[in-house]
Amino acid sequence: MQLIKNNKLGSIYIDVSGNLSAIGAVMLVEEAVTELLGNMELDGISLERKYGAVWVYTKTRVKLLKDIKWDAPYTLTSFISRKSRAGINIDVAIENENKELCSYARVELCAIDVKELKIRRTNEVGVDDSIEAHEPWIDFSFARYTKVEYEKVDEVKIKFSNIDFMKHTNNKEYVRFIMDTYTVDELLCKPIKELEVVYYNQSYEGNILSISKTVNESSELFTVDRDETIIVKAEIIR
């Protein structure tokens, strides 16, 4: 199954230049993943009701390839690109009205038992042989993170609006926290071309998170921590 939607880019998805923003792309991807799974009755709420499990994002990577302006038409296509016993990948492609690929993303998910907090095999939560995996549109891979030294650049407290239906911090909020470490001028002069977030642990309302950063030759690396616990790591390419 594929999800194909035609729409116009809304104002909540744009940045100060009037184009699709990095956080806007992440929002569109999250909505597409949820709707695609919902169409197969495999969304998080359905999974919890039927199997006592929920989907957990383990990785998200988004490429921003070409600008899409506010109110411009676009076509979004979402599909499962890989499935295994341990999890699934869902790809999300966004094209403009000229069929040019403007953004491409991949989300890696696994199913977690709500009570035991252990990974469930996908065939135990409805991902059977009837669920088709489609070929990816482009070559796409996740980053590998090596041990480096980071410098603290910000601190945030998790509040009500950061929380999702599972009562932990929503995936896209970490992208927002990281984006807020930049200034408007920095991103206008050198926009984001690609971003990745790897999810290690959950955070909850009231938690204080430290955001730290280091810069290498090709990208900017971030870690978001709660005390000594790594919550997410991220890579930004500009």
Image (tube, rainbow, N blue to C red):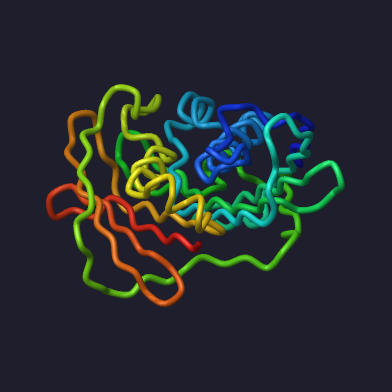
Q: Residue 164 versus residue 22: which sits nearer the camera?
A: 22
Q: Residue furthest bottom?
A: 217
Would residue 178 be found to the left or right of residue 172 on screen? left
Residue 212, above or below 115: below
Nearest the viewer among 141 and 209 is: 209
Q: Position of residue 58 (x, y in %)?
A: 43, 52
- Classify the position of the N terminus by image quarter: top right
Q: For residue 117, which quarter of the picture?
A: top left
Could you tell whether 227 is left or right of 30 in the image?
left
- Residue 37, how many percent across, how many down? 62, 35
Residue at 44% across, 39% down: 172
Residue 101 or 89: which is nearer the viewer?
101
Q: Nearer the viewer, residue 125 or 44?
A: 44
Q: Residue at x 55, y 50 (%)?
A: 107
Decide if residue 229 is on the left or right side of residue 25: left
Residue positioned 22% across, 51% down in the render: 225
Q: Residue furthest left?
A: 227
Residue 68 point in image, percent of width and height: 70, 43
| Image: 217 above or below 55 | below
In which quarter of the view is residue 164 placed?
top left
| Above or below, 16 relative to 22 | above
Residue 141 position within the rendered picture, expressed as x and y whole percent measured from the top left? 57, 67
